[in-house]
Amino acid sequence: MLVPTKKKPQVTAAPARRRELLDTAAEVFAEQGYNATTVRKIADHAGMLAGSLYYHFDSKESMLEEILRTFLDELWDGYDTVLGAELGPRETLAALVTESFREIDRHRAAVAIYQKESKQLVAQERFAFLAESQLRFEKAWLSTLERGVTDRVFRTDLDIRLAYRFVRDTVWVAASWYRPGGQHSPEEIARQYLSMVLDGIAVRE
Amino acid sequence: MLVPTKKKPQVTAAPARRRELLDTAAEVFAEQGYNATTVRKIADHAGMLAGSLYYHFDSKESMLEEILRTFLDELWDGYDTVLGAELGPRETLAALVTESFREIDRHRAAVAIYQKESKQLVAQERFAFLAESQLRFEKAWLSTLERGVTDRVFRTDLDIRLAYRFVRDTVWVAASWYRPGGQHSPEEIARQYLSMVLDGIAVRE
DNA sequence: GTTCTTCCCTAACAAGTGTTTGGTAGGTTA
DNA sequence: TAACCTACCAAACACTTGTTAGGGAAGAAC
């Protein structure tokens, strides 16, 4: 019982308030950019003062890390379910795209942050998990495309790495304009995107 | 001859050194993000001290403005030539995509900056020209797609605004991974992208 | 040879940055 | 009632930021 090791809320299981603050922080990060966002702005949006944030979090950077980790954890939950179902390549691609749009719907802010900042963040060892995730991501998509090519489901005359970047980007950039509760549901957007990616926008002869 | 009105180089026609500095600044902006880039970093890359930059430029912000203005001017030179040729919708789309990849090849850094920062910049009146350009851009692409639909060249069952964002994003996001002097020429990338956008990645029955 | 111009340096400035320290109101526990 | 914990505030900290003022070296102009 010596040295009570002042239990800071950072280490305990995340309470509701903590999640609340992370949500508002993610919103501001996504809107203004991480570097342009000051802790005072976050505190403003949360109705408190800058210093008070440090009761809940170690640093501004740790807030960013937790936002991205939470998002990626949930993303891979969905992806692993899809990949574990062992569907055909075309169905796997469709399921991955649909799942991605669902994640955009649920984690719009986090996705936007990821898109904007991940490239610079991976350089820091603290955010090395971004690189790992990116690698798994690439493997999942590339193998699906390759399977589709060998199965003669996808065209064989295309550069597969270009196709990968093509599909990947078309999906995730949507986070920059997507607004939850808009005209289209995530599933509807996924359906139209898939239609364009798979069959193209030109009329068939 | 009273008051020699100290001619600052900012107002005169751009000398070579000025363009040189803007190029290095654009490179750093693109790599680290505008807000994360300090004038000292720019000066480092240019082999001089921070204060010396202010002999050439009014401010950090004016450097950013000139980088984006130069890029957009050249972009619209190319676009206007394409649009003025009065080609069919499919050919216009192909020409616009190809022209876009050429611009990415020539202004990689500026395009990357535009992609990352424009959304937050348009709020400032100084960067209102970004909004104008964006509007012209949207008109050009949307009208091309609409013409294609009425001409039965493009599919009629697609949400045309979704298709617009689809094509727009697929093209410009390429700036985030494209490296000049790589395996593929801009024209080759454009050809493959067009093939995917027009005909899709699925095998035709 | 003197003057002028170009281009950079040195040194500082004020404002804004993330973060820390000590305190405190209010509820919960003993 | 007393001790304690939670969640915040108030005020400052060291540092970085964009920017400015004055000066000086090297060459061009006269």
Image (cartoon, coloured by chain):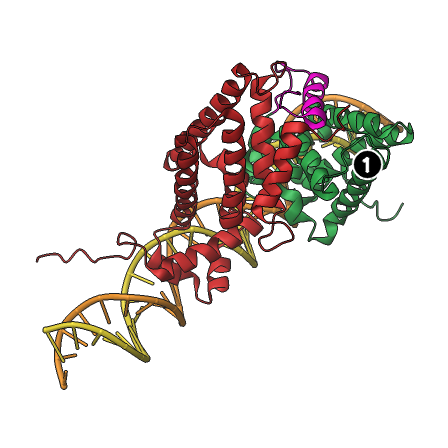
Chain colours: A red, B green, C yellow, D orange
- Please give the chain letter of the residue carrying mark 1: B
Residue span colored magenta: B178-205
In which quadrant of the rendered view does residue D7 lie?
bottom left
Judged left or right of residue A143, residue C30 is left
Q: Residue at point 80% right, 35% down? A: B73
Residue at the farthest front position = B205
Can see residue A205? yes
Q: Amino acid at mark 1?
A: Val
Query: Could you tell me residue D16's position as x and y percent?
Result: 48, 44
Looking at the picture, tell me which residue is in the foreground, D4 or B80: B80
Q: Quadrant of the N terminus of chain A?
A: bottom left
Can see residue B59? no
Q: Quadrant of the C terminus of chain A?
A: top right
Q: Secondary structure at mark 1?
A: helix
Residue count near mark 1 (Cα–Cα under 10 Å), binned few <14, some 14–19, many ≥20: many
* Pointer 1 residue: B149
Judged left or right of residue A92, residue B178 is right
Q: How many marks?
A: 1
Judged left or right of residue B118, residue B12 is right
Q: Is residue A177 above or below residue A18?
A: above
Query: Could you tell me residue B32's position as x and y percent?
Result: 54, 35
Looking at the picture, tell me which residue is in the foreground, D17 or C25: C25
Q: Is residue A183 above or below residue A175?
A: below
Q: Is residue B83 magenta?
A: no
Q: Is residue B180 magenta?
A: yes
Query: Could you tell me residue A114's position as x and y percent?
Result: 50, 41
Looking at the picture, tell me which residue is in the foreground, B187 or A99: A99
Q: Residue at point 60% right, 52% down? A: A179
In which quadrant of the rendered view does residue A170 lie?
top right
Query: Could you tell me residue B26's position as x and y percent?
Result: 64, 33
Q: Residue at point 39% right, 41% down? A: A73
Residue at the farthest left position = A1
